[in-house]
Amino acid sequence: MKVKGFLKDVGGASRITKARISAIDNASPVPVKVDPIHEVAYALHPGRIELVVTDIRPANSTCKTVRLQAADGRRLPLFRAGQYIVLDFQIGDSLVSRPYSISSAPLCTVGEDSFVEVTVRSGDGKLFVSDYVWNELKVGDHLSGIVGCGDFFYEPLRDAYHVVALAGGVGITPFASMAAEVAAGRLDIDLTIIYGAQRHDDIILWKELAPLEGEHVHFVHVISGEDPDWQGERGFITAELIKKYSHEDTTYFVCGPQPMYLHLYKEFDKLDLPARRVRFEVFGPVKDISQYEGYPQEAKGKTFALTVVRGIHEDVIPVRADESLAVALERAGIRIETGCRSGECGFCRSKVLSGHVYVSPVSDGRRAADKDFGYVHACAAYPLSDVKLKVPIL
């Protein structure tokens, strides 16, 4: 940009205004019916789209991989390797949303056979949606979803070239997406995936990932249980093991179950790394909110009344002290938009009109102003009394 001088530069706005007026005066009287900028934006970020299940196959003995394509056959929107999809399920009277890391690579959305895949573990009769996916979801079923959410992806302006990904359980899924992009030459990083499992046959997506190993994709499996034939690393993922497979400048990505996070927080403290070099994926709702510091133990086991305000309409539903407000709303069949279910994205932002709630200290992604004015993310807020909650009308 050329500097013309102080007065000419600060007067630039008036020149632009005159140019715009001239362009409008000389424009064609025929209206423009197509906005190319809008078309590009919609193609990249269409919001919620209709999807159809086109394939379901085992990923190991406890997990299934579900392939989803656009119901109208169009190309799915682009996403970054490591991001997740939010899927909506109608299960009985409940309409619920769940986030799933995308296990397929972004390159799979390119071309006519555009698809995304998610890999879901069985709920063993304990997890509402996972059990539905495992036992009832079938090819041909229709869902709706939002593709490409979250910021758990590689960013060259922030992250180092050498990346060590630490995974446990279905936490391998975002790294499967990254590994496929690296192997295809579409992501310029050196990726080492350290995956913890009890036995080698517990490793998820083994058959899909093994062919990707090469010059820039490396796998280290760490077995913690009894597995007499295993010849690789044993035990747990420790600071010593992390250091063994690291370079001088490395970025660490972590995705797995909550107990793994609690373990790795301590191990990373031993390595004395800059905070910008360690990235933890959000892990969903906490399993036992009463274990966190500051939670009033006298609330345990109680059930409260939740008054739900939508415009001028009010409903009163029960809510247990050990469940988030979002879960209570879903169980009652009241639509609440959720994304990450970890207090981060803000999809379920609602206002507490009266009553008291406890906000998970590890899932409090609210802005300072929201805290001051009584807003909560319903997926990370737990009742401590009867609560009156104003939610968005959907």
Image (cartoon, rainbow, N blue to C red):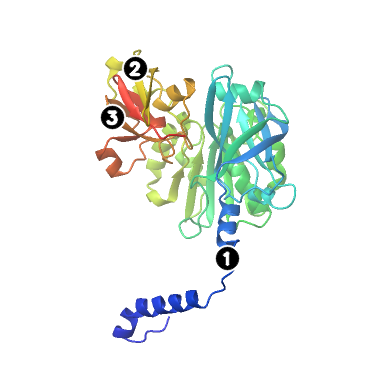
Name the residue type under label 2: Ala
Residue 41 visible in the shown view:
yes
Circle 3/circle 1 CB separation < 8 Å: no
Query: Is residue 69 toward the left or the right of residue 330 in the image?
Result: right
**Location of mark 3 (residue):** 353
Q: Residue 107: horizontal and vertical position, in percent? A: 67, 51
Kindly identify the amino acid type of the residue bearing the numbered disc 3.
Leu
In the rendered structure, find residue 262 and report the number of the disc placed on it. none
Residue shown at the point (63%, 26%) measured from the top left: 133
Of badges 3 and 1, the one in the foreground is 1
Q: Quadrant of the N terminus?
A: bottom left
Secondary structure under the numbered disc 2 in the rendered image: strand
Measured Cα–Cα span from mark 3 to mark 1? 47 Å
Indicate the quadrant where residue 233 lies: top right
Query: Which residue is pictured at 66% across the width and 22% down the height?
Result: 136
* Residue contact at pointers 1 and 2, CB within 8 angstroms: no
Going by the picture, which residue comes out furthest to the bottom? 4
Residue drawn at (30%, 16%) of the image: 299
Residue type, mark 1 in image: Pro
Q: Which residue is mark 1?
A: 31
Q: Which residue is nearer to you in this view: 331 or 272?
A: 331
Q: Earlier in the sequence, mark 3 or mark 2?
A: 2
Left or right, 260 with respect to 325, comes to right
